[in-house]
Image (cartoon, helix red, strand yellow):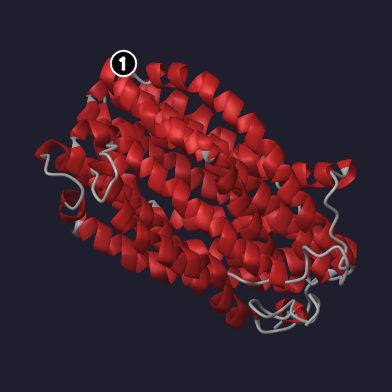
Amino acid sequence: MSPVEDSTADGLPGDDLTTAPIPQLVRRLAIPASVGFFFNTMYNVVDTYFAGRWSTDALAALSLSFPVFFILIAMGSGFSTGATALIGDALGRRDRPAAAAVAAQGLVLGLLATLVIMVVGYASAPSLYRMLGAEEEYLDLCLSYLHVILAGSGFILTFYMFNGILNAQGDTRAFRDYLIAATVANVIMDPWFMYGGLGLPAMGVPGIALATIIAQAGGVVFLGRRARRTGLLWRSTGARWRPDGAILGAIAAQGIPASLNMMTVAIGIFVITYYLSAFGQDAVAAYGAATRIEQIILLPALGLNVAALTLAAQNGGARRFDRVRSTVRTCLTYGMLVVLVGSTLMFIGADWLMARFTDSAAVVAIGGHYLRIAAFIEFAYVLLFVNLSVLQGLKLPIFALWIGLGRQIVAPVILFTLATRVWDLGLDGVWWSIFGITWTAALVAVAFALRKVDVLASRSGNDGVGGGP
């Protein structure tokens, strides 16, 4: 069988994304993606659980390391998102050779980015950790985890690029299938590598990092095989493996703003952690565990971001902006329903959920109080992320960066300083500042995305009158 003949074996037929009913497509894309995100978060929950059982310092070290690790994830996810937008747009225009060229060059770009990340990461990590108050044994614990992660960073970036290629074609099932297997394996690898046994020495916290790298390497093999079966990585289809400056530049133009936007999340966590560190390690550990719980609550809605990105990219390429509008409406409707249930459960069971991660009464109390406030923030995240995903799919990534800079850095520095150092509101000042910042950013994103879709529809002659399926 030729690669073109097998191009839809694991995804959706190319024209299905521009013709089938939007609610049906959103479900077909979002549900597997949400399940995948669930197991991705459960993978992280497993890490958090075993680190907490090792020691409070280990749990705090993972919380402190997460922003640095997230920068690596941001690079992979950002370039993957940029490639998805360009591949989807090309497929929407029925230009398969252009889609294949972007797919291959995206992998090339991921490998080049790996070198940069490793050099910068090894050089800057000690200073970054010291800024957050890590010294002596605590610092050594953080670095021992991160150094293993950086050594395997190429697997992480390549994994994300393969997933971007699959997402652009409507295949979100491969991501789900891999993460189910990886999470089960992590339940075995984490305690094995940490405590030793069967010929392995006890590695402690670095064992958690090693388990992550091994899992990512398995993901590269699994997703790589699925991506190859789509045909977009074949030379006969149009793939180009020698670095092409024009294509690399196009991916970078889409991917760098997306990566920087995600990096603002990491910087934002640095900012929050910096202010929380003044309240002690219990506050840092509580926030780290609480954000894991927030991720779980948002999981059913996170798949909607993938659906919004993919459908906006392909239908934008096909100049079907009526369908882009329908995508936004459908995703937000589904998102509102699932978040309502999750937020209610989070509000009612905040302390119980926190107690699953730690035996410390102080950590449970701090984290539980934050979660009861965060329960009223979750739908703002849905509004924000769906609209930003649509803009990314329409090859308009820069707005997300500006929102990210304001939401994660500028506004928090101003409000956290006022709340904790001028008005002396304590931790509540941090929590309610997060509430106000997130809702403001969400409403701004909604207004901007609506205006941009209207402008693009007007330019294309498709004003959406009569609507799409």
Q: Quadrant of residue 336?
A: bottom left
Front-lying residue, 117 or 214: 214
Q: Amino acid at mark 1?
A: Glu
Q: Is residue 421 above or below residue 270?
A: above
Q: Position of residue 442 (x, y in %)?
A: 53, 50
Residue displayed at 39% across by 48% down:
211
Res 423 seen here: no
CA neighbours of label 1 inside 10 A, class few (<14), some (14 to 19), many (20+) = some
Q: Which percent across, then down, holds residue 439?
A: 47, 47
Residue that badge 1 annotates: 135
Q: Is residue 242 left or right of residue 151?
A: right
Q: Position of residue 126 (x, y in %)?
A: 44, 18
Q: With 247 as the anchor, is 213 left or right in this view?
A: left
Point out residue 37 in the picture as x, y percentages from the top left corner: 45, 61
Q: Residue at x 88, y 61 (%)?
A: 459
Q: Is residue 47 above or below residue 123?
A: below
Residue 12 appears left or right of 31: right
